[in-house]
Structures are given as structure tokens and as C-alpha cells.
Image (cartoon, rainbow, N blue to C red):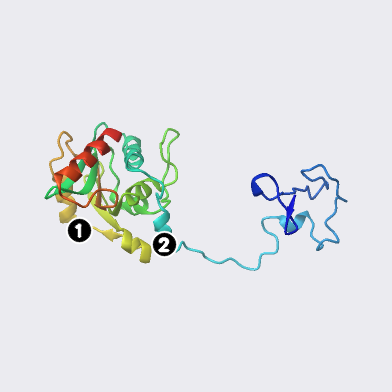
């Protein structure tokens, strides 16, 4: 049946007719004359990847693209992505902790004793789609998991790491800066040293990585134990 002259199929879906330009056969079995001439004078060459290019323009993502990062993540999925990164780094032990202040949950930290990220590779690690080599057994491939998982749950992502060279480095993404300018902050070495030398039992952090998420989105802002404790227990069970 038709509505306003447009063929409408079951559940109001539009009828799509697919035709083979070269051979003139459509998806519904109807024959055409096999030629595009006379219908705008297009032929198969007009559909090539380099057809009739005038110039190229640079199209960087707009800052609000950050709002879509990890949009459909739940907390357990976000943590699983972070753990995947630790596994890829050959971590033998991974520690997950909730950060609390005056009873309220203010952050989440994940610590591993993996290979760590070299200081000169940290920018790539914090870049959306950052370029790095992935092994055949790597659990991540697209360079977006760390950022997507963190920003799905928090407005601040801090990454501090130290590799076998003994040199530590850290960077922090703030969601607001990411939305407006794609700027990522470099942390001072004294703070980096304090994070890496902190006691993270049972992990002895010679080299490894600390991922810190602050200003959590999904956790209750309240400090009332009657609100916080049930939420925390349910979250831990899901992990």
C-alpha cells in the first residue's frame, strides 16, 4: 500500500530497490537496460573512490564528541575495559578501590603491576584512538577503551604509570576541557612520584599503572550510610 505516493511496506518501512549498475538487475528481479546513460550520464567510473575530487579538508571532531564516548557503558563494563588494559600489560595483580571522603564515594582507582606505560608513550595512551602496536592476543585494538570506560563514569581521568626504565609520568583528562578544547593536562613529577610510591597493598608497585577516576557520575552524592552502603554493596556484587 502507499501513503502520500511513497511505497510503504510492513511496519511502515520504506521499500528499497537495489539495482546493479553494470548488469541492470535489481534486487526485486526487474531488468533494466544495463546503462546509466540518459539518467544523468553517470557510469560505474563515477562511483570510484577518487572520482572527481576537487580538494580535501581537515575535519577534526567537535568537542561535544566526548559526550558520546562510552555512552552505553555501565560501571561493571567500564571496569572490565580497564582490567582488559591491565591484562594486556601482563599484570599479575590488579587492585580496585573506591575512594571515599566523609562517607561519600568520590572516586574509583584501579592499580596494576603490569609493564607500565613509557613516559614518551603516555600522550598516545591518552589520545582517542592513540596509535600503538597490538599483539594477536590483545583485548583492545582501537585505542579508545581507557577513555571511553573512564568518561562513561567520571568527569576526570588521571593516568599515572612507570615502566621498567624507572621513569614515571602522568596525565589528566578533565571532561570539561575535553569538550571545549581537547586539552589534556600533564602532571608534575612530584605528584606522580607520590602516587606511584603510595602503599597499594597487596601490590608492590615497582612498575605499573594507576588509573584514577574522580567526580563520579553514577554514584550517589550523599554521604548518608543508608544511601551509600546499599549502592556500594550492589556495585561490588556486579563486579
The residue sitting at 26% across, 31% down in the picture is: 92
Tell me which numbered mark, 2 or 1, is placed earlier along the sequence.
2
Place of residue 135 in the rendered image (x, y in percent of width and height, measured from the top left): 43, 36
The residue sitting at 85% across, 59% down in the picture is: 37
In the image, which is nearer the foreground, mark 2 or mark 1?
2
Whether residue 239 is visible: no
Residue farthest right in this picture = 33
Place of residue 161 in the rendered image (x, y in percent of width and height, measured from the top left): 25, 46
Tell me if 74 is positioned left or right of 96 in this view.
right
* Residue 188's disc number: 1
- For this rendering, which residue is in front, 77 or 82? 77
For residue 88, what is the image quadrant? top left
* Residue 225's disc number: none
- For this rendering, which residue is in front, 193 or 102? 102
53 relative to 152, above or below? below
Tell me if 191 is positioned left or right of 134 in this view.
left
The residue sitting at 22% across, 36% down in the picture is: 233
Q: Residues within 10 Å of mark 1 (few under 14, many from 20)?
A: few
Q: Which residue is mark 2?
A: 64
Tell me if 223 is positioned left or right of 94 in this view.
left
Amino acid at each position: 500500500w502507499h501513503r502520500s505516493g511513497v511505497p510503504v511496506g510492513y511496519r511502515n518501512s520504506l521499500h528499497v530497490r537495489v539495482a546493479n549498475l553494470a548488469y541492470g538487475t535489481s534486487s526485486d528481479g526487474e531488468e533494466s537496460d544495463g546503462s546509466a546513460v540518459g539518467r544523468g550520464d553517470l557510469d560505474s567510473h563515477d562511483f570510484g573512490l577518487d572520482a572527481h575530487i576537487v580538494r580535501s579538508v581537515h575535519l577534526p571532531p567537535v568537542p561535544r564528541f566526548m559526550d558520546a564516548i562510552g555512552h552505553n557503558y555501565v560501571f561493571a563494563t567500564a571496569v572490565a575495559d580497564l582490567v582488559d588494559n591491565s591484562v594486556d600489560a601482563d599484570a599479575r595483580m590488579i587492585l580496585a578501590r573506591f575512594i571515599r571522603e566523609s562517607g561519600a564515594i568520590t572516586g574509583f582507582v584501579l592499580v596494576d603491576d603490569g609493564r607500565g606505560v613509557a613516559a614518551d608513550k603516555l600522550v598516545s595512551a591518552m589520545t582517542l584512538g592513540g596509535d600503538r602496536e597490538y599483539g594477536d592476543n590483545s583485548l583492545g585494538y582501537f585505542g579508545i577503551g581507557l577513555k571511553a570506560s573512564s568518561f562513561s563514569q567520571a568527569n576526570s581521568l588521571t593516568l599515572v604509570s612507570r615502566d621498567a626504565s624507572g621513569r614515571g609520568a602522568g596525565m589528566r583528562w578533565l571532561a570539561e576541557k575535553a569538550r571545549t578544547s581537547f586539552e589534556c593536562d600533564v602532571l608534575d613529577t612530584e605528584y606522580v612520584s607520590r602516587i606511584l610510591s603510595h602503599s597499594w597493598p597487596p601490590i608492590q608497585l615497582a612498575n605499573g599503572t594507576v588509573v584514577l577516576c574522580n567526580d563520579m557520575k553514577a554514584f550517589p552524592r550523599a554521604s548518608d550510610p543508608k544511601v551509600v552502603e546499599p549502592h556500594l554493596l550492589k556495585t561490588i556484587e556486579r563486579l
